């Protein structure tokens, strides 16, 4: 089983970006933790980060036939990208939406997710654990 792990805009700066909100782990460290979990679940991961909406959509299109699902932290695209919403529907893969911070306890605009109803679950506010639970949830769903 192969899973895309997609990180959206500004997540390349994790570790230095607002650590009080997003924690101290770098994106590489998060990916390493995901890789360790993936090994124990016996699944393969394909990692991607971009600050560009179109590049994320291109990546999803490119790998739609060789992956079984998607864990995505779309960053701010979550809140307004209908193109990303359409892409999740278009590739027809199970998707879990994850956020490091609690998007429900911050500015009101962050409570809106335009992709949520195309995802099997939204996990938010647990830092690294949001990603790990996201991967586990997706794998359990795909194996069911
Ligand atoms: C985020 C929350 C978003 O509102 C924000 O724009 C991000 C990161 C999170 O992981 O908490 O870039 O998705």
Image (cartoon, grey):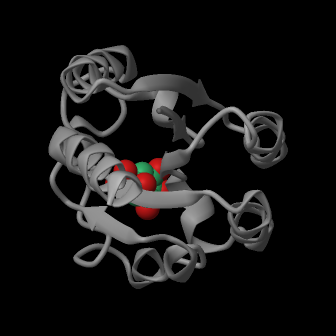
Q: In which quarter of the image is the C terminus?
A: bottom left
Counting from the top left corner in percent of width and height, residue 95 is at 51, 59
Residue located 21% across and 26% down the image: 37
| Image-quadrant location for residue 44 | top left
| Image-quadrant location for residue 27 | top left
Counting from the top left corner in percent of width and height, residue 101 is at 26, 56
Counting from the top left corner in percent of width and height, residue 82 is at 75, 73
Q: Is residue 40 placed above or below 131 in the rendered structure? A: above
Residue located 84% across and 45% down the image: 54
For this view, does 1 lie left or right of residue 93?
Answer: left
Given residues 77 and 117, the one toward you in this image is 117
Q: Which residue lies furthest to the front in this view?
A: 144
For this view, does 50 lie left or right of residue 1?
Answer: right
Residue located 47% across and 35% down the image: 11
| Image-quadrant location for residue 43 | top left
Q: Is residue 70 placed above or below 121 in the rendered structure? A: above
Residue located 69% across and 32% down the image: 66
Counting from the top left corner in percent of width and height, residue 31 is at 35, 21
How many badges with numbers are in the image? 0
Q: Is residue 141 placed above or below 13 in the rendered structure? A: below
Where's ligand 1: which quadrant?
A: bottom left
Given residues 86 and 127, the one toward you in this image is 86
């Amino acid at each position: 089983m192969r899973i895309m792990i997609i990180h959206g805009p500004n997540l390349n700066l994790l570790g230095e970006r607002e650590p009080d909100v997003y924690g101290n782990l770098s994106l590489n460290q998060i990916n390493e933790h995901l890789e360790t979990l993936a090994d124990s679940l016996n699944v393969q991961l394909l990692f991607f980060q971009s600050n560009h909406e179109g590049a994320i959509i291109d990546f999803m299109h490119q790998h739609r036939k060789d992956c079984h699902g998607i864990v995505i932290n779309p960053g701010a695209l979550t809140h307004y990208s209908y193109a990303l919403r359409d892409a999740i529907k278009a590739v027809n893969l199970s998707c879990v939406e994850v956020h490091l911070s609690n998007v429900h306890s911050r500015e009101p605009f962050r409570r809106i997710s335009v992709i949520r109803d195309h995802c099997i679950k939204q996990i938010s506010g647990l830092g690294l654990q949001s990603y790990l639970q996201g991967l586990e949830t997706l794998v359990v769903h795909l194996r069911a």
